[in-house]
Image (cartoon, rainbow, N blue to C red):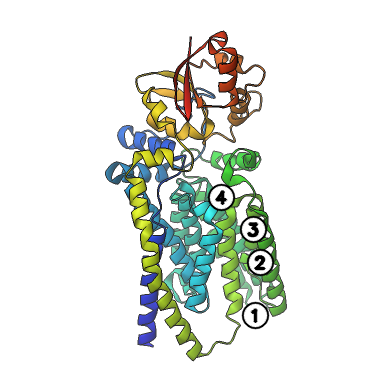
Amino acid sequence: MELKAQVAKIIIILLAFNLLIAFFLPVKDTDFGWHYRCGEEFITQGKLCLQNEYAYFLPDYKWANPNFIYDISLAKVFDHFGFVGVSILGSVIFTAILLLFFLILRGPYLLRVIAIFLVSVLSLSVFSLGYRSQILGLLFVMVELFILKGPTLERSVLYKDGPFRIAVLAALFLFWSNSHPSFFLGPLFLVCFTIEKLVRLYLDKSRSNQGKTQSLIFHSALFLIPTLVTLINPFGLRIYQEVLQHLQSPLNQMIAEWVAPDWWQVILIIMITAVVIGAVAIKKITLDFRLALLLIFACFAILARRNLALYYIIAFWLLSELLIFLAITEKTKRILQIITLITLIVGIPIFTSQISKTLAFDASFSNYCQNGQIRLPCQAVNKLKDKSGNLFNMYEQGGFLIWQLPQMKIFADGRMPAWKDENGKSPYQVYLEIIQAQSGWNEQLKRYGTNYLLINNGTFLDLLLQEKGAPNFGWQQEYRDQLSVIYRKM
């Protein structure tokens, strides 16, 4: 038994080392800039990002997006350690997520490692972008799932001591509701978990009425107290209204990660979901809140690729529960452990090349500008460092410009897809009307008080200004390179 425990520890250590290396990813998040500036302003001025002070479109818009803990930690790490520090932080967060996943899985270690590999590969559209606020939200999801359904909880103090368990969840929800908008998943999971427990309680004929009453009180408190704690944030109930506003907005038409996954992913999701539900029905497995989550996140994942990771985590978790019904001899288990050890040892040199790639990327601001998620107008930005005023910009470059040009106000950025103006239009819709040079584009720029345009070379608006002469519209070209062009209001 002692040898078996030692082998288990070695496997977990090797797995953690593999994950730390594999997820030491370069910083490519296009929203890094505004997150950093929000965090930096709190550190230097004690000011939270409670309203829109960075854009001249919808100025002073009250935006109930609780990213404070993420923003502040991001700024602290970047100020001291640069992009490399952010990559290291992301590596640690990714590793914590997948280690928690490993611990809640059932069955042989080799199958657990394979499950981690599959989740990582199938979720590359989310994971490949490196550390972002969404990844911190995923960590909170895994912590909650571990608390609710961890494999050892029935023998732990955390499970037996009800008030302590509630306190842990309440603390988690407090951090979550001030770190990322995915906080609403916490109460959602608790709803499913509580319903399962209450149904089981109703069907349990062996328990006394007093025992049922105590259990009812506990599970009601388990849901209500942590959920109410989410309201301890600068916006109160408005953070839930912000979530509803995002869910009602056509984000799949504005943001790449909100578009549907590839067709083969959709088919795979449907197949896995059908297999799990069919196996549960055949095995007559008792009611489990994770089945409800599987169906919910199957729908979420089919609608938006950003939800793939959470769907696959829940799906493979349930599949691991089904696999424990397979008879595996002790000899087979030992063989699988040896294969797992060899696999993890071999994985270290394979993933090591990731270290040099990320260090090279993070050490060069030019790489960040040229080879990130999108190309950024770094050369053009240098021409605007001594300028001030209102700058109409490319939507996806807005977060970067908020960071690099603090003396200017930009038009729109990644914070704003679900916002609405007085006509019910989102900033992205208004941005498209202008950049596509639709009727009335120049009048809109004048109405909003635009002083400069920083747009991509070759856009509809740029081609129109070149073809018909920028001065005829009241604009003067000041700079042009292969990526960007700057126009100044005459």
Q: How many marks?
A: 4
Q: Which residue is mark 4?
A: 184
Callout 3: SS: helix
Percent across and percent down for residue 18 are 39, 66
Residue at mark 2: 272
Q: Earlier in the sequence, mark 2 or mark 4?
A: 4
Callout 4 crowding tier (Cα within 10 Å): few <14, some 14–19, many ≥20: some
Closest to the observer, 264 or 328:
264
Q: Does residue 12 appear left or right of residue 465 in this picture?
A: left
Q: Residue at x 64, y 53 (%)?
A: 262
Give the image location of residue 290, x and y in percent. Answer: 61, 65
Q: Nearer the viewer, mark 4 or mark 3?
A: 3
- Spatial CA distance of label 4 from label 1 is 35 Å
Residue 223, relative to residue 426: is it above or below? below
Residue contact at pointers 2 and 4, CB within 8 angstroms: no
Q: Secondary structure at mark 4?
A: helix
Contact? badges 4 and 3 (CB < 8 Å): no
- Which of the two labelled residues, at mark 4 and mark 3, occupies the earlier sequence position? 4
